């Protein structure tokens, strides 16, 4: 039994994968992953195939020497997306109003190509981590105060294993694998640098905690029950998360997802969690 992307693959499953490729050697990776999802009934809660996740799993199986995939249509890879700055994201006059003097806050999900392209450009230009594409289930938002864009946010898949979080939840290993999708990671949170309104960040966090579970359900057919995020401890103190009642549960080890060493090689980050419903632990452990 092997585990890839949170799913257990039995010996029969591996034979199914190999049989699909043997039956049609010309089958490319995308149709292969879709056919495999259909055969294994690997779907999201809303019934959609988890074909993107399946392709990641297949690549990891190949890296482990278990299978040999058909050649990629793009041998050099897609490359990392690049979003050079344009006048559309140039800095604006600083906004120094107190939070209560701003227009009403609204969170607008990113749904069109043009808005998505601009969101990516803002993040690439002004977030210290830059732009990195999210995989799997995700939501991105523009945050407006009245008609003015003040912040940008994104949410996606949670960390596979996280000692501080997993102790806080108290879930056994089988339940973690089964229910991990109910934990959503706040991957990016950017207050635009010319927006200087004390208390705005925590107010946005409180609002997203009310809105995202509904939006996520509309898009994916289920409601997450816990937020997580990481704050680079040498760069930020996580003040806005604390003000919005997030819980600090420890720090990352600083080794990265695939590291084989036992000492920090990337910045250590504080782990913050926010329960989206009171019985989150029982839901995650049931």
Image (cartoon, rainbow, N blue to C red):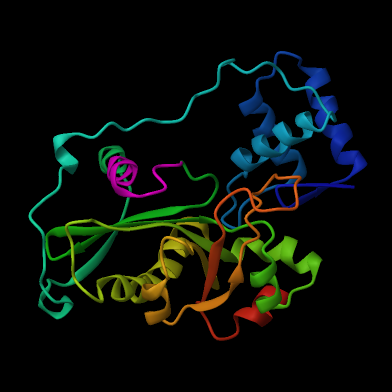
Residue 234 versus residue 280 in the image, above or below: above
Q: Is residue 286 visible?
A: no
Left or right of 231 on screen, residue 15: right
| Viewer-proximal residue among 269 and 85 | 269
Quarter of the figure that contains the C terminus? bottom right
Q: Position of residue 278 (x, y in %)?
A: 55, 86
Residue 235 versus residue 100 in the image, above or below: above
Left or right of 149 on screen, residue 152: right
Q: What residue do we see at 25% from left, 72% from top?
A: 200
**Residue 61 painted magenta:** no
Q: Position of residue 65 (x, y in %)?
A: 84, 28
Q: Is residue 55 visible?
A: yes
**Residue 130 painted magenta:** yes
Q: Quadrant of residue 59?
A: top right
The magenta-colored residue range is 119-132
Q: What residue do we see at 70% from left, 44% from top?
A: 258
Q: How many discs appear? A: 0
Q: What residue do we see at 51% from left, 57% from top?
A: 220
Q: What residue do we see at 66% from left, 71% from top?
A: 164
Q: What is the residue that sits farthest to the bottom in this orientation? A: 278
Q: Quadrant of residue 241?
A: bottom left
């Amino acid at each position: 039994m092997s585990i890839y992307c949170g799913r257990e693959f039995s010996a029969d499953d591996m034979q199914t994968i190999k049989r699909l490729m043997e039956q049609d050697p010309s089958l490319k990776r995308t149709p292969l992953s879709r056919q495999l999802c259909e055969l294994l009934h690997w779907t999201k809660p809303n019934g959609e195939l988890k074909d993107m996740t399946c392709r990641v799993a297949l690549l990891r199986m190949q890296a482990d020497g278990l299978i040999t995939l058909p050649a990629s249509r793009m041998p050099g890879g897609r490359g990392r997306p690049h979003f050079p700055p344009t006048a559309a994201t140039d800095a604006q006059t600083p906004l120094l109003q107190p939070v209560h003097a701003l227009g009403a806050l609204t969170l607008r999900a990113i749904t069109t190509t043009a808005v998505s392209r601009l969101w990516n450009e803002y993040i690439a230009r002004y977030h210290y981590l830059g732009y990195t594409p999210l995989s799997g289930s995700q939501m991105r938002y523009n945050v407006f105060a009245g008609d003015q864009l003040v912040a940008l946010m994104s949410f996606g898949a949670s960390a596979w294993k996280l000692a501080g979080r997993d102790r806080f939840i108290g879930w056994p290993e089988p339940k973690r694998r089964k229910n991990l999708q109910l934990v959503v990671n706040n991957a990016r949170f950017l207050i635009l640098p010319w927006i200087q309104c004390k208390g705005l960040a925590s107010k946005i966090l409180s609002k997203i905690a009310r809105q995202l579970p509904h939006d996520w359900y509309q898009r994916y057919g289920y409601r997450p029950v816990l937020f997580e995020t990481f704050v680079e401890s040498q760069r930020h103190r996580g003040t806005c998360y604390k003000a919005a009642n997030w819980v600090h549960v420890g720090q990352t080890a600083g080794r990265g997802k695939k590291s084989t060493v036992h000492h920090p090689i990337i910045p250590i980050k504080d782990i913050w969690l926010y329960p989206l419903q009171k019985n989150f632990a029982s839901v995650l452990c049931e």
